[in-house]
């Protein structure tokens, strides 16, 4: 049982490049979310999903896209990377609302 | 907007004492509050959930309270140990999403 798997663990991008952060869970969880974590600011919600085909914006969605074509996968796309998107990104999943979330180990992204 | 506020200053306590961390929320009461532990370089780990209609929840040495009048949750670790040193995050849940506070760093000294 792998839990929540995020790839890659580290990534350096140049300003303007695009990339996809991968997130997969094998727990058959309906709820999945993406967060970014910056020093002193805690976790901020980017996008979330309550099931395949359903996504919604969180607190800081600008510059990011998501899709949820399967229950297992929830990729996060950076359309045109900016230095302000330098952060640690966490994917998390949960069985349903009112349940604890399982987090991945994170992707450390640097945009230069 | 619905905010979660945690004391940004680190909490330093002596081993064996009870650590108490505070989480305050704004606006309406959330359906539930969750507490997580995060170690450096790792993802948060779920500890406890308490619902709006519950006053208190316990799990081993951990205790969480939910006071809708004060708009506050308290997180207690009794008989604290150096291994409890970490950052503890509070999150408010409802409307299918979870919003986190900035976290409070706890340091337990031998």
Image (tube, coloured by chain):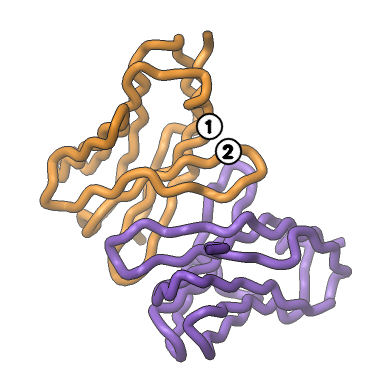
Within 10 Å of disc 1 (Cα), the crowding (few <14, some 14-19, many 20+) is some
Q: Which chain letter matches label 1?
A: B
SS category of the residue bearing label 1:
strand
For mark 2, what is the residue? B39
Chain shaded orange = B
In the picture provided, is A25 more to the left or to the right than B33? right
The picture quadrant where one finds residue A20 is bottom right
Disc ID at residue B58? none
The crowding category of the residue bearing disc 2, from other C-alpha atoms within 10 Å (few below 14, some 14 to 19, many at least 20), is some
Please indicate, yes or no, whether residue B10 appears anywhere in the rendered image: no
* Observer-nearest of A69 and B2: A69
Residue at the spot x=88%, y=69% of the render?
Answer: A14
Query: Where residue A97 sits: x, y (%)?
Result: 30, 67
Residue B13 is situated, as x and y percent measured from the top left of the image, at: 45, 14
Secondary structure of residue under mark 2: loop
Letter of the chain shown purple in the rendering: A
Q: Are marks 1 and 2 in contact (CB under 8 Å)?
A: yes
Residue toward you, B66 or B29: B66
- Relative to residue A73, is residue A93 drawn left or right? left
For residue B86, the mark is 1
């Amino acid at each position: 049982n792998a839990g929540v798997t995020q790839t890659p663990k580290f990534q350096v991008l140049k300003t303007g490049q695009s990339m996809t952060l991968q997130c997969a869970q094998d727990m058959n969880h309906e709820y999945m979310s993406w967060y970014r974590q910056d020093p002193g600011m805690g976790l901020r919600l980017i996008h979330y999903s309550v099931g395949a085909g359903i996504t919604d914006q969180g607190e800081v969605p600008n510059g990011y896209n998501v899709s949820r074509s399967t229950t297992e996968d929830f990729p996060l796309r950076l359309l045109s990377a900016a230095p302000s998107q330098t952060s640690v990104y966490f994917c998390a999943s949960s069985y349903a609302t009112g349940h604890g979330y399982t987090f991945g180990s994170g992707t450390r992204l640097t945009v230069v | 907007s619905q905010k979660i506020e945690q004391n940004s200053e680190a909490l330093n306590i002596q081993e064996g004492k009870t650590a108490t961390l505070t989480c305050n929320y704004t606006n309406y009461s959330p359906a539930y509050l969750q507490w997580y532990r995060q170690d450096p370089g790792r993802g948060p780990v779920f500890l406890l959930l308490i619902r709006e209609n519950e006053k208190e929840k316990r799990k081993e040495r951990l205790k969480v309270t939910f006071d809708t009048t004060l708009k506050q949750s308290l997180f207690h670790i009794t008989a604290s140990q150096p291994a409890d040193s970490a950052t503890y995050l509070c999150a408010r849940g409802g409307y299918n999403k979870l919003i986190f506070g900035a976290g409070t760093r706890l340091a337990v000294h031998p």
